[in-house]
Image (spheres, rainbow, N blue to C red):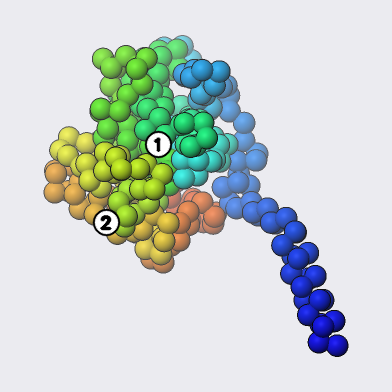
Amino acid sequence: MKSLVFLTLLLGLSLQAQTPAKPKDPDATDLRAAKLQPTKIVVYKTVGALELKLHVFEPQGLKAGDKRACFLIIHGGGWTGGAPPRMYPFAAHFAEKGMVGISMSYRLHSAKTGVSVFDCVKDARSAVRYIRSHAVELGIDPQKIIVSGGSAGGHLAVSTALFDQVNEDSDDLAISATPTALVLLFPVIDTSKDGYGQAKIGERWQELSPAHNVRAGLPPTLTFHGTGDTVTPFAGAKTFHEAMLKAGNRSELDVNEGGAHGYLMRDAALLDDTLRKTDAFLKSLGLME
């Protein structure tokens, strides 16, 4: 009898191990993204056979000669996954507010393909340069480019302002990659052993750690972060914020008590609250009417 019970349990465990993992249920951001489509998709850089693209949401009434503010949003996924549609709700929201909203793709880090996190950073900086150099045809004011991103995308967003030494060889370095303002969503902000990303970046991690590279003259920055984040710990966001203030930069830290990683993407009310607070921040900078 005991043998029969043991075999039954063993069979059950074996079947459980073979059962595919249940797909993640769509959250508030996914549900909104599923209903959205960009106005157009533009290639901003080609690397080998890979075309990197800007998914552009144009505001109603955009016409030749317009100089609209631009809101560029970058998806997360640990630099190794994710795709532009995840951030469509942000691009669409700011297009509704009269801006040109853009969600971008970038090379994904992979030891197999040889793409490093440095390459991801290069792509983000290339995207800003493309937008600035094609501002006329895109209907964008080159002096009003806001860059935002979630998690690893937040890291790439702040990288556009921080890491002047990390550039694609084909980029025109006379064109600035520094945005006018930054909006960071639960970002990878400390790549030390106390933060996230050191294993993926390698021994040069400090070169790509925002918290370790703050200096004067950085763009005004709004950061959203939860105190319950165990992926990109809140302590890093606090350190970055305090370093920004000490350097004389404008920095605002919106704290969600107990918020886990990605908290604002999952709940419609929190997502709307994030967008409202971002609107207010951009209005205070004269980047939104």
The quadrant where residue 171 appears: top left
Residue 194, x across and y down, in percent: 31, 57
Residue 204, x across and y down, in percent: 29, 40
Q: Circle 1 is placed at which residue position?
A: 117
Of residue 288 and residue 220, the one placed in the foreground of this image is 220
The quadrant where residue 51 appears: top right
| Residue at image point 41% right, 24% down | 127
Identified by mark 1, the residue type is Val
Residue 96, x across and y down, in percent: 50, 34
| Residue at the outermost bottom position | 1
The quadrant where residue 39 appears: top right
Question: Is residue 104 shown above or below 176?
Answer: below
Mark 2 or 1, closer to the camera? 1
Which quadrant is home to the N terminus?
bottom right
Q: Earlier in the sequence, mark 2 or mark 1?
A: 1
User: Are dots 2 and 1 in contact, CB under 8 Å?
Assistant: no
Which quadrant is home to the C terminus?
top left
Of residue 160 and residue 107, the one placed in the foreground of this image is 107
Residue 23, x across and y down, in percent: 68, 53
Q: In the figure, is residue 214 to the left or right of 190? A: left
Q: Secondary structure at mark 2?
A: helix
Report crowding for label 1: few under 14, some 14 to 19, many 20 or more residues within 10 A (C-alpha): many
Q: Secondary structure at mark 1?
A: helix
Residue 238 circle label: 2
Gap in Å between the C-alphas at discs 2 and 1? Answer: 23 Å
Q: In the figure, is residue 258 to the left or right of 191? A: right
| Residue at image point 28% right, 17% down | 173
Q: In the figure, is residue 150 to the left or right of 163? A: right
Identified by mark 2, the residue type is Lys
Query: Is residue 202 something one can see in this rendering?
Result: yes
